[in-house]
Image (tube, helix red, strand yellow):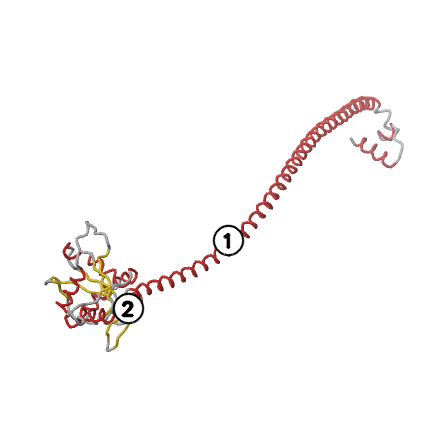
Amino acid sequence: MAHMAQNQASRKKGKKVTIENFYGGSTQGKENEEEIQKNSEHASQNGNYQQALEDLKLELIQKMETFWKEKWEKEISCLTDKNAQLEKELEASNTRADKAEKQIQSLMTRIKHLEESEMIKQQESIKQTQTINELEENIKYLTEKVTDLENRGRRENLRIIGLPEKPEVNNKLDFILEEIIKENCPHVLEQGGKIEIERIHRTPSILNPQKTTPRNVIAKFKSFQVKEKILQEAKKKSFRYKGAPIRITHDLAANTLRDRKAWNTIFRKARELGLQPRINYPAKLTIYFQGKVWAFNKIEDFQAFAKKRPELCGKFDIQAQKARET
């Protein structure tokens, strides 16, 4: 091994390697000829081994290169296929995105048109609501005017309630009315003991057999003053016909009668409390409270007034009273 190291060192330094300097000089050459021969044979075997090892390395390197080349070619081919597939998917995705974008733009356009249409409809609805409100106000005003004209057309009329429904009565209502006046307020009669009546009739004109109460009688006087005198007397005392009680009131329009009837519950309670209630024309409630006369056109106004007065608060709850009556 020392000789081999010396040989390698000599090669590195550029010296020529001989058998003599390889084995230590000429003095020892002769003595070691057999040993040199053995070492030569051994070196020859060693060289064959090294050559075989180098060949094996080269073969292994070639196989590894072939293996990795094939493997990387497969990987590259696979990646190429995947890349192509991704490009196709990307292209399809872009197509879908473009289609979706077009659909979105179409929807946005439709939404814009709908919003504009909705805005126009809202504006039209507001105008229609305003028009309807104006029409309702006009209808209310005209209804009130018609009702007022109807009431004024009935100002010479009296309504007689409770007169018996008999043929002998219905056939001579004018004479029956004179008898009622003679029996209850004879001083109202004009000279000659008669009352000038323009017309008198039952209402409604057709008798309903299902009703047990007699129909009302409407009498139209030629003189408004005579009619008012009879009405004032009827307010002072109860009228009778042959001992049977009857009532004489204003002959008013149906709307006015309905509005007056709405005060009935409050009117009865106010009378119980000593508030001296009255229903004035057309349907106005008046009461006497704390030394003053108070007038109310609407039930809501009266209820708001009663809630603010401890003496009246809770005593005019119409719903509670109706529930108790039921």
Give the residue type at disc 2.
Tyr
SS category of the residue bearing label 2: loop
Badge number at residue 281: 2
Q: Which is nearer the eye, 24 or 172?
A: 172
Q: Nearer the viewer, residue 99 or 255?
A: 255
Tell me what residue is drawn at x 54 percent, y 51 percent.
Answer: 117
In the picture, measured across the screen, residue 171 lies left or right of residue 134, that is left
Q: Quadrant of the N terminus?
A: top right
Q: Is residue 120 found left or right of 176 in the rendered image? A: right
Q: Position of residue 99 (x, y in %)?
A: 62, 40
Q: Residue furthest front?
A: 192
Q: Tell me the element at label 1.
A: helix
Task: State the quadrant of the C terminus.
Answer: bottom left
Q: Position of residue 67 (x, y in %)?
A: 70, 27
Dot 2, crowdedness within 10 Å: few (<14), some or many (≥20)? few
Q: Is residue 21 above or below residue 224?
A: above
Crowd class of label 1 (few under 14; some 14 to 19; many from 20; radius 10 Å): few
In the rendered structure, the answer to whether residue 100 lies left or right of residue 235 reads right
Q: Earlier in the sequence, mark 2 or mark 1?
A: 1
- Residue that mark 1 sits on: 121
Q: Tell me how many marks there are.
A: 2
Badge nearest the viewer, 2 or 1? 2
Task: Measure the C-alpha gap from mark 2 to mark 1.
Answer: 45 Å
Based on the displayed image, in which of its 4 quarters is residue 303 positioned?
bottom left
Q: Is residue 4 above or below residue 226?
A: above
- Snapshot quadrant of residue 263: bottom left
Q: Indicate the amino acid at tag 1.
A: Lys
Mark carried by residue 97: none
| Farthest-out residue, left | 243
Reply above or below: 203 against 11: below
Tell me residue 148's x, y (percent).
Answer: 33, 65
